[in-house]
Image (cartoon, grey):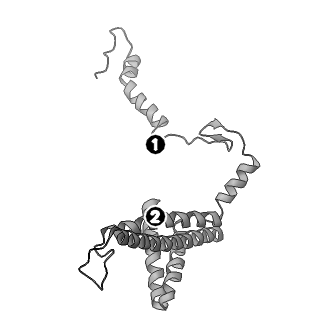
Amino acid sequence: MAAAAPKAGASASEAAASAEAPLQYSLLLQYLVGDKRQPRLLEPGSLGGIPSPSKSEEQKMIERAMESCAFKAVLACVGGFVLGGAFGVFTAGIDTNVGFDPKDPYRTPTAKEVLKDMGQRGMSYAKNFAIVGAMFSCTECLVESYRGKSDWKNSVISGCITGGAIGFRAGVKAGAIGCGGFAAFSAAIDYYLR
């Protein structure tokens, strides 16, 4: 789009102002949505500039309960159980040895045997995922409460504690490897999610 030509009788300042109009518009945009935008201070009782009523005691009590370490651990346990069960059933579905009887290798397994094996593997994965999820979530919440900060170090510390606790059942070396591996995995996940 070409700028409008100044009128014949217009002064030099008006001509300059009409030539600078697009520049002023982009400056205005910088102040509205660009780098020069000023942060807007929101009052505690407002949500996005819209006033909201103060919270009742019941709402505050529910928020405190949902922020507790016990609730987070139970939520991670249930989520881990569901996710682990689905993962176990999926891996059993793609495994060629599900329902296989080593005593009679030429016999084709029945659907009942295959479903039974899939259910057993799903339950095994579900329990393992639930325990690991609850341990990690609880230790992360406790570390965060102790440190008073919410940063990447909490997940690394809790990953080391969880991995070490799981690995120490097989010995000190396995505990150290579990600590390092789980901490590195937690750091990588936290890096990509934050």
How many marks the image carries: the answer is 2
Q: For this rendering, which residue is in front, 7 or 105? A: 105
User: x%, y% of residue 158?
Assistant: 54, 74
Residue 3 left/right relative to 73 = left
The answer, for residue 73, to whether it is visible in the render is yes
Residue 39 left/right relative to 90 = right
Q: Secondary structure at mark 2?
A: helix
Under mark 1, the amino acid is Asp
Using the image, determine if residue 38 lies above or below residue 99.
above
Under mark 2, the amino acid is Leu
Using the image, determine if residue 55 lies above or below residue 4.
below
Q: Residue at x 72, y 52 (%)?
A: 60
Q: Nearer the viewer, mark 2 or mark 1?
A: 2
Q: Secondary structure at mark 1?
A: loop
Residue that carries the numbered disc 2 in the rendered image? 83
Q: For this rendering, which residue is in front, 178 or 118? A: 118
Residue that carries the numbered disc 1 in the rendered image? 35
Q: For this rendering, which residue is in front, 166 or 44? A: 166
Q: Residue at x 47, y 89 (%)?
A: 170
The answer, for residue 153, to whether it is visible in the render is no
Looking at the image, the residue that sits furthest to the right is 57
Q: Residue at x 46, y 74 (%)?
A: 124
Q: Residue at x 64, y 66 (%)?
A: 70
Q: Quadrant of residue 95?
A: bottom left
Q: Could you give the CA–CA distance between mark 2 and mark 1, rounded to whole angstroms? A: 43 Å
User: x%, y% of residue 149?
Assistant: 60, 65
Q: Quadrant of residue 19?
A: top left
User: x%, y% of residue 3?
Assistant: 31, 20
Q: Quadrant of the N terminus?
A: top left
Looking at the image, the residue that sits furthest to the top is 9
